[in-house]
């Protein structure tokens, strides 16, 4: 995962905590519309990860996924706590932005 703060002129790595650097080939990164510092990334084989500091650090939020290969992610724009993850075992959802209840 790379981030640019200057419109793409330069990039820096922001992958601390990502146990897999194999990102989903589809829509694998989504940004919470309430805060651009909160991001989710889907991976091939390691599930979903969440960052609340603009990508500086990541933690797994894959509780309940039957398969850790995630092909795409989507956030419900009317309720950003609802996150959808699509993978080889179907579509899964969380209503707590990936956080335990």
Image (cartoon, rainbow, N blue to C red):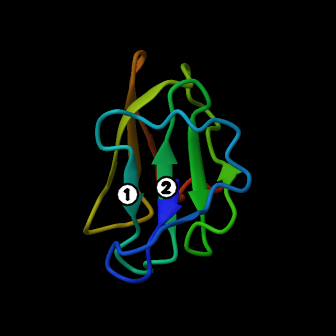
Q: Nearer the viewer, residue 97 or 57?
A: 57
Mark toward the start of the polypeptide (1 vs 2): 1
Residue 32 percent across, percent down from the top left: 40, 69
Residue 20, image quadrant: top right
Q: Is residue 90 left or right of residue 38?
A: left
Mark 1: give few (<14), some (14-19) or many (20+) Cα within 10 Å.
Answer: some
Whether residue 70 is situated above or below residue 10 in the rendered picture: above
Q: Which residue is at the far top?
A: 89
Say which mark, if any, is on residue 30: 1
Element type where label 1 sits in the image: strand
Residue 73 percent across, percent down from the top left: 36, 44
Whether residue 97 is situated above or below residue 68 in the rendered picture: below
Residue, x 73% and y 51% (percent of image)?
17
Say which mark, if any, is on residue 46: none
Residue, x 64% and y 55% (percent of image)?
15
Residue, x 38% and y 44% (percent of image)?
28
Say which mark, if any, is on residue 40: 2
Q: Is residue 90 left or right of residue 95?
A: left
**Mark 1 → mark 2, Cα distance in angstroms:** 5 Å
Q: Is residue 8 left or right of residue 17?
A: left
Q: Which residue is at the far front?
A: 9
Q: Nearer the viewer, residue 48 or 26?
A: 26
Mark 2: give few (<14), some (14-19) or many (20+) Cα within 10 Å.
Answer: many
């Amino acid at each position: 995962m790379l981030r640019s703060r200057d419109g793409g002129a330069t990039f820096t790595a922001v992958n601390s905590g990502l146990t897999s650097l194999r990102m989903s080939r589809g829509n694998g990164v989504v940004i919470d519309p309430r805060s651009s510092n909160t991001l989710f990334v889907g991976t091939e084989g390691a599930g979903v990860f969440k960052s609340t500091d603009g990508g500086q650090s990541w933690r797994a939020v894959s509780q309940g996924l039957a398969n850790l290969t995630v092909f795409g992610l989507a956030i419900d724009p009317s309720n950003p706590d609802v996150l959808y993850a699509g993978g080889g075992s179907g579509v899964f959802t969380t209503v707590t932005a990936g956080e335990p209840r």
